[in-house]
Amino acid sequence: MQLYVLLYLWRMAKTTGSAFDSFDEAKWLEQAHSVDLLANHPEGWSMPIRGNVNDSWPEMPRKATGEKNEGNLWQLQQSFVHPEDVQQGLAHGVGGLRLKGRAPLSALLDGVYLNMVSIHVDRLWNEEDAHDLAKSAKGLDVQGSWVSWVSDETIDQTPWVEHAQRMSESFPNMRYLGCDAAQWIESGSSRIDAMVRLCKTMDSILEGIQSANLEASEVLNGMVWSWSVDVEILSEIAGLRALRLLWEKWLESHHLGAIPIWIDGRTSSHSYGMDLDTDHLMLQTAGAYALVVGGADGLEVLPHDVQSGSSKEGLRWARNIQHLLKEESGLDHTFDPMGGSHTLESWTHHMLDAAWSLYQGEGNQRMR
């Protein structure tokens, strides 16, 4: 078998050079100029094929996971419902435990060294859960998020803000406020619409901060934005880059200092439709690649069989997708890997400008 593979590779090496004509740059440029270079995306932003350079465009801000010189860091996250799956996930490199089950936190966290991982609890805080986490922590300064998801920009956010402030006193290194744009995207909103809703929700949160007489920078330092991507890789990368720039633009417009936003990204199952569960592995890999290159801080890849209940094998393969992107592809080495790509830079800023213009055009009116 090995001999066969070597002979095959030798044959490919001998024939590849003559299999294609040499690249003719002049011919390519001639054909490229005949293509519409300012096509419009259905979401309302321009997507030039070759892009351009604009010296006024700001650089990508740092991520919440680390400084730019540390590379493109991200946290491998995974959701767990059953206590027996948690230890398997930890053994396979999960750095962020997302706990969604109804089992007591003490059961889910049994045997977990909380100083080595981040805990992300996607449910409302209550006294029983607080007691379970404190019991498991045993005085440790727990990292992660216990997010009260703000998903409606039309309501008074003061109680949410006050709630987050109280919780931060118990575990200061956990994040307690979040805007769940992922649910808007997965219910049919475009990326642009989701960005506008994020800005409007942030306006409501800022009003709540001011009503509670709290320091805005302290509260916003605990903010999480949740985002969802499908398989349009280049568009999704541009969208994530625009999302981080949108946060900076919103801060600047409200005269607030630079505060890194934590973006939790997850892949989507919207494109599922093939007969075999294993067919979904390519879709999840494409989404994971977009999240990594786009710069998500936390990343969860859905199991390929999530619609069937997420088997242990499915959870393992979902983790391995991220390991391959990091350990085999080295995508964590370079901050903003697509920075400098004329096309991606153009798409990023056209998307950002479209969302910001729509947000400003609607003023402080609440979206229906």
Image (tube, grey):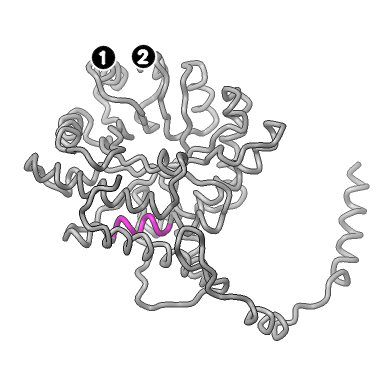
Magenta stretch: helix, strand or loop mostly: helix
Residue 6 position, x and y percent, is 89, 52
Q: Is residue 295 magenta?
A: no
Q: CA distance from mark 1 to mark 2?
A: 8 Å
Q: Which mark is residue 72?
A: none
Q: Is residue 262 above or below residue 17?
A: above
SS for tag 2? loop
Judge from the rendering whether residue 5 lies leftward or rightward of residue 278; answer left or right. Answer: right
Judge from the rendering whether residue 195 lies leftward or rightward of residue 135; answer left or right. Answer: right
Q: Determine contact: label 1, label 2, CB under 8 Å.
A: yes
Judge from the rendering whether residue 141 lies leftward or rightward of residue 291; answer left or right. Answer: left
Residue at the outermost front position = 368
Residue 124 position, x and y percent, is 29, 25
Judge from the rendering whether residue 110 lies leftward or rightward of residue 8; answer left or right. Answer: left
Tell me which corner region of the image, top left, top right, bottom left or bottom right, holds residue 213.
top left
User: For mark 2, what is the residue?
Assistant: 104
Q: Nearer the viewer, residue 236 or 201?
A: 201
Residue 179 position, x and y percent, is 32, 41
Q: Nearer the viewer, residue 175 or 307?
A: 307
Q: Quadrant of the N terminus?
A: top right
Q: Quadrant of the C terminus?
A: top left
User: For mark 1, what is the residue?
Assistant: 128
Amino acid type at image mark 2 = Pro
